[in-house]
Image (cartoon, rainbow, N blue to C red):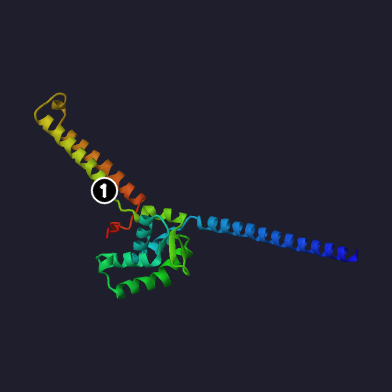
Amino acid sequence: MSTIGDSSGAGDNDIDNETGDSDSTVAKQVSDILDSNGSHDERATPLSRDMVFDVLKNQRRRYALHYLKQAEETVQLSDLAEQVAAWENDTTVGAISAAERKRVYTALYQSHLPKLDDAGIVDYNQNRGIVELSTAAEQLDPYLETNTRDDISWCKRYLVIAGVGLALLTAAWLEVPPLAGIGDIGLALFVVVAFTVVAIAHTYDARRTPSTGEQAPEIADE
């Protein structure tokens, strides 16, 4: 009887130990999740203007961000270094030398990617050699994107005003009613005011969405 009792007691202790271990594991998992959420919230903090300019003042970092934006997924550091080296040397990935590749790889590995990771702009796993953009990187879009399309749209606006002004002046010269009674000074004043309004709007738009002033390089198909 005592043997049975002792065996039962030992079983209870084993169950208690297993339950304790299970509770500890669950608690650790919950803690990890909370820590992960906290880290994510911290990375979502708005970037200061000084931080943005400090990050983007280096062309190699801008090239790295351009590549990550186009990839839209986790990439290998080796692939990133190859493409950045190709852009820097104005050539293709297949044409870069081993020295050019190594120089860019080392700089990204030791300096640029850790800096971007500390700023919360990328998620960089140095041990595994993988990197991807974080949600905070979206704050850089107005600075990384070029204004080529916007400039084209503004050019069209100027052309429209010039065309309308020329049409009005021609109609007045031909004395087409009701423009026959409007003097040249009045028509000229209208055109000048129209150009002034559009120019002010263009200036405001350019200052509201600044950019690096460079064309985003495209990943060439091999």
Q: Going by the picture, which residue comes out furthest to the top?
A: 177
Say if 143 sits above or below 199 in the image: below
Nearest the eye: 151 or 15: 15
Residue at coordinates 37% horizontally, 68% vertically from top-left?
78
Q: Going by the picture, which residue comes out furthest to the left?
A: 174
Say if 163 sits above or below 56 in the image: above
Residue 39, picture quadrant: bottom right
Residue 207 placement, left or right of 191: right
Residue 213 placement, left or right of 114: left
Q: Going by the picture, which residue comes out furthest to the bottom?
A: 99
Residue 189, percent across and down?
20, 37
Disc 1 packing (10 Å; few <14; some 14–19; many ≥20)? few
Q: Name which residue type carries label 1.
A: Asp
Residue 140, picture quadrant: bottom left
Residue at coordinates 18% horizontally, 39% vertically from top-left?
162
Q: Quadrant of the N terminus?
A: bottom right
Circle count: 1
Residue 222, percent across and down?
27, 60
Q: Which residue is disc 1 drawn over?
A: 151
Nearest the eye: 212 or 112: 112
Residue 61, percent across and down?
37, 64
Nearest the eye: 46 or 7: 7
Residue at coordinates 27% horizontally, 47% vertically from top-left?
149
Residue 172, percent across and down?
12, 30
Say if 162 sits above or below 71 in the image: above
Mark 1 secondary-structure assignment:
helix
Nearest the eye: 184 or 21: 21
